[in-house]
Image: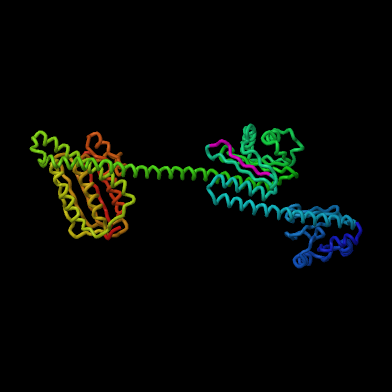
Amino acid sequence: MDQTVAGEQHASHSAVVADSDHDRLAATTSALEAAGFQVFPATDTASMTSQIEQRHPSVVVAENALAHGLGSPGVPVLLLLDEQESVDLEEVESWRVADYVIIPARPGELVHRVQTLIGRARERARSRSEIEALRESLRNVSSKIRRTNDPQLIAEHVVQGFGVALGVDHVWFATFRDERVPSIRAQWNRPGLPLLPARLGESENTISETANRLWADADVLAVADHREDPDSQIAKALREWSCELNAVSTVLLPVGEGASAMGIILLSTVQERHDWTRPEIALMQHVAGNVAHGLIQGHLISAQQRVLHQLRQLDKAKTDFLATVNHELRTPLTSITAYLDMIQDGSGGPVPDGIRKMLEVIARNSDRLRRLIEDMLTVSMQDGSNLDLKPVDIDKLLQVVVATLRPQAESRHVSVSFTEATEDIEVTADEAKLEQVFTNIVANAIKFTPEGGRVGITSALSASDDGGPSALVRIADNGLGIPEHDLPHILTRFYRASNATSAAVPGSGLGLAIANDIISRHMGRMVFDSILGSGTTVSVELPVGGP
């Protein structure tokens, strides 16, 4: 090479040359300067290290003895070795880019080795920069995947992200028939190229088998040039799938979880060969893992959202049904009870005793039906109704409840007693709804207590779990009791204890559920303590001062 041309080509390069032999140092310096290098000489390790730190050279040319202990200079290193000398391979490896030349070396060989080292270092830096840029691009793809639960959007993010980041011509993504994920197809193409088929067609078995094999081996199928083996099974499958996919280079990347693949990502070039690097494949596999996680999570969330939507629809249908039934039942029942009252009052003439007894049975059942309709109406309106809050004296409220239900208790020969608290207890509550609560509970206690039994009601000021004052009302009976296996379900709407059903005790299973709903909305709680055959105690706790 002409030295003038070489000097112009490498004028921007600099070198630190370290050699304890002054003649060799001069010869090496001269050869590099003739090739256009700016040279900074050094005769010992300390001065060499100082020059490297100050000058930031393009290359270091150093005698082996001086280079020992150099550390990581961050630039390529050319060692000058005697024929009998050996190098510390572990240390040289830490320099990343290094070479050696046997001394004395010809000037041309020395310059060639230095230029080669600089070229390798430049290529290594370029490659590292490209990988870092690819890593950042694919990191953005993973970030987009994590920000959505829409499986189709995840697929579109991955095909576009791979296409742009890797500079390929086609990216195609599909899931197989798999219960873990929905059926998805997505693709990205370099502008001007035709779209690929949406379905795998007859090639699906071959491609899915390949994907499962790759997934089992934790591998990918990377083909740099299909023209070197056009008759391979996968090349044939791709051609059969799409005659227009005349691929030069391809990567088949499985997307899976657990024991099997659930989908495949295909990347291909149709114009230029692409030598797939290990860092590229590793980064793609990492993103594929995020895709699998995102698809499964998104599919589960979508399924949960569909179930929630269906439950809301069912709940609305239930509410609408109950409201309609209430209206349709109330209208004829009102007419029935009105005419029944008129007959019993003698408006139609005298009523014989036998007929009067029949009318009394009709009246009781009409009243029972009316209460059932009211309970159903309460259930249908419970969630949307507001509380009409005001100060309520608990003892006065309980006295009203006892007075209202005493005739029912006496007809069953059940005694009802009420023991007031020793001090006034006032809560902020909806008085009508609170009266409904205690009416339901006390009526339930009377109904499940046999003749000659008793129901006792007490009120007292107590302390809640958080230490604040609360009103505690207990309704205790010595009736049937509740079987232990029924207790966890006793507050469920329409649920009836097994012994109530077997004993043919009438009821809808709504009274306690309604009472519990109301108490919960008042920030209170209900507790059941029951022994089968001995009776039940229902404790109601309400915060003093209101919810």
Relative vertical location of residue 446 with respect to residue 79 in this rendering, above or below = above
Residue sitting at the far right: 2
Residue stretch rendered in magenta on the structure: 170-178
x%, y% of residue 526? 28, 49
Secondary structure mainly formed by the magenta segment: strand
Query: For the point 25% across and 35% down, which residue is it?
Result: 501
x%, y% of residue 19? 83, 62
Res. 170 image quadrant: top right
**Which quadrant is home to the N terminus?**
bottom right
Query: For the point 80% across and 65% down, which residue is it?
Result: 44
Query: For the point 49% across and 45% down, which residue is it?
Result: 301
Residue 173 among those drawn in magenta: yes
Query: Quick check: 33 left or right of 311?
Result: right
Q: Who is closer to the viewer here, 363 or 513?
A: 363
Res. 487 image quadrant: top left
Query: For the point 63% across and 51% down, which residue is it?
Result: 138
Residue 262 among those drawn in magenta: no
